[in-house]
Image (cartoon, rainbow, N blue to C red):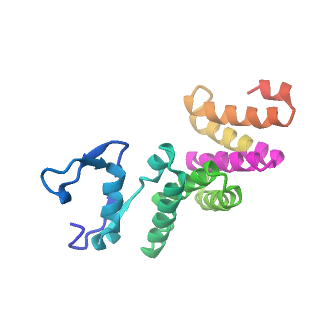
Amino acid sequence: PLAAGVRVVAAHCASLGKDHDWDAGDKAGKVSSFALFSRLMNEPSGANLYGDLAMALAAAGEGIRAIDLYRRALADSEAAGLEHGQAYWKIQNNFGLALLGADLLDEAGTVLENCVRMRRAEGAGLELASALNNLGLVRGRQGRLGDAEELHQEALGMTLGIVGPDSDLLAPYYGNLAAVLDRGGRYRDSLEY
């Protein structure tokens, strides 16, 4: 389908495992799934292939490769006119987290501010809460504890309003807010969360 010009979006494009490299012949051994998917993306027909394996690379400790793939995915999405959709936002949000993990805080802040702007334009929801929370993580790492607290409070309040007080989805929001308060020396306040 790729060679015929069909645009393909792959949700789970690779894993930490290994697969047969059929292009190397029947007797070829297994190679990294990431390497195979990357090779496919770099073929001429790969211009029509969209997938997000960057988050898995980041989890595997290959943050720089992940950042490069996120940049490519965003550029490809923009070139295809897809920069206003749900998939674009998710790639941007994960890109911001990869940048945070690589300690590229200024760029992470810029990317996540854009995510927050995009999601605010569409109204409140769990996606906006996620972007607010992630931007709060960046601001906390930058030492901007007041901004971080405000972002985490908004994310927590929004999520509480959507899922109710008994949801497991609240745990990271409570934990991130408590960590910011603790870091700012507000130990009693942090115990509330």
Q: Residue 148 in magenta?
A: yes
Left or right of 140: which side holds 51? left
Residue 137 position (above or below residue 183) = below
Left or right of 64: which side holds 33? left
Q: Is residue 10 visible?
A: no
Residue 171: image quadrant is top right
Residue 160: image quadrant is top right
Left or right of 126: which side holds 177? right
Q: Report the residue at 19% width, 60% height from top.
A: 23
Q: Residue 131 in magenta?
A: yes
Residue at the extreme right: 185
Total residue callouts:
0
Residue 133 placement (x, y as % from top left): 66, 45
Residue at the extreme left: 26
Q: Report the residue at 75% width, 32% height from top.
A: 178
Q: Is the magenta stretch mostly helix, strand or loop?
A: helix
Q: Is residue 100 visible?
A: yes
Residue 52 placement (x, y as % from top left): 42, 55
Instruction: Please name whichever residue, 175 or 168, is drawn nearer the observer in this view of the structure.
Output: 175
Q: Report the residue at 60% width, 46% height from top.
A: 130
Residue 63 placement (x, y as % from top left): 53, 51
In this picture, which residue range is highlighted in magenta? 125-151
Left or right of 94: which side holds 81? left
Residue 94 position (above or below residue 117) = above
Residue 176 position (above or below residue 133) = above
Q: Report the residue at 48% width, 72% height from top.
A: 78
Instruction: Please name whichever residue, 159 or 92, is drawn nearer the observer in this view of the structure.
Output: 92
Residue 91 placement (x, y as % from top left): 50, 57
